[in-house]
Image (cartoon, grey):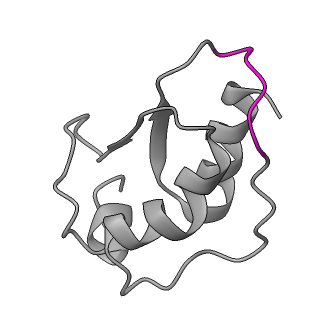
């Protein structure tokens, strides 16, 4: 899966925007989840459990609705609401 496809897959499943710091056409792991992570999870939990194991060591940035990078303690419910 290319980086751009991975970023889109995370958006489609999780409802959050991420940016992987790698060329958009670089091949990385896949995002095979069908259901969104629990809304009570913190951003760091999502990154550690679902995203970072699939990006081959590349940096991942999470973006909230205003384009800013939230701290890792923000819960997913709050992050998802920021896009509305």
Q: Which residues are magenta?
A: 24-29
Task: State which quarter of the image contains the N terminus.
Answer: top right
Q: Is residue 53 depicted above or below 55 in this figure?
A: below
Counting every numbered tag in the picture gives 0
Q: Is residue 16 magenta?
A: no
Q: Position of residue 65 (x, y in %)?
A: 30, 45
Q: Position of residue 68 (x, y in %)?
A: 19, 37
Q: Name the residue rendered at 42%, 33% in the picture.
A: 59
- Which residue is more in the foreground, 48 or 71? 48
Q: Position of residue 32 (x, y in %)?
A: 81, 61
Q: Name the residue rendered at 67%, 54% in the picture.
A: 12
Q: Is residue 47 depicted above or below 60 in this figure?
A: below
Q: Is residue 18 left or right of residue 36?
A: left
Q: Is residue 66 left or right of residue 16?
A: left
- Which residue is more in the foreground, 3 or 66? 3
Quadrant location of residue 2?
top right
Q: Position of residue 23 (x, y in %)?
A: 61, 12
Q: Is residue 10 depicted above or below 61 in this figure?
A: below
């Amino acid at each position: 899966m290319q980086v751009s496809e991975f970023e889109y897959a995370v958006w489609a499943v999780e409802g959050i925007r991420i940016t992987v710091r790698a060329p958009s056409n670089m091949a990385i792991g896949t995002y095979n989840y069908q259901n969104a992570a629990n809304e009570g999870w913190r951003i760091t939990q999502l990154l550690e459990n679902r995203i970072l194991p699939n990006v081959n060591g590349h940096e991942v940035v999470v973006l909230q609705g205003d384009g800013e990078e939230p701290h890792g303690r923000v819960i997913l419910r709050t992050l998802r609401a920021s896009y509305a």
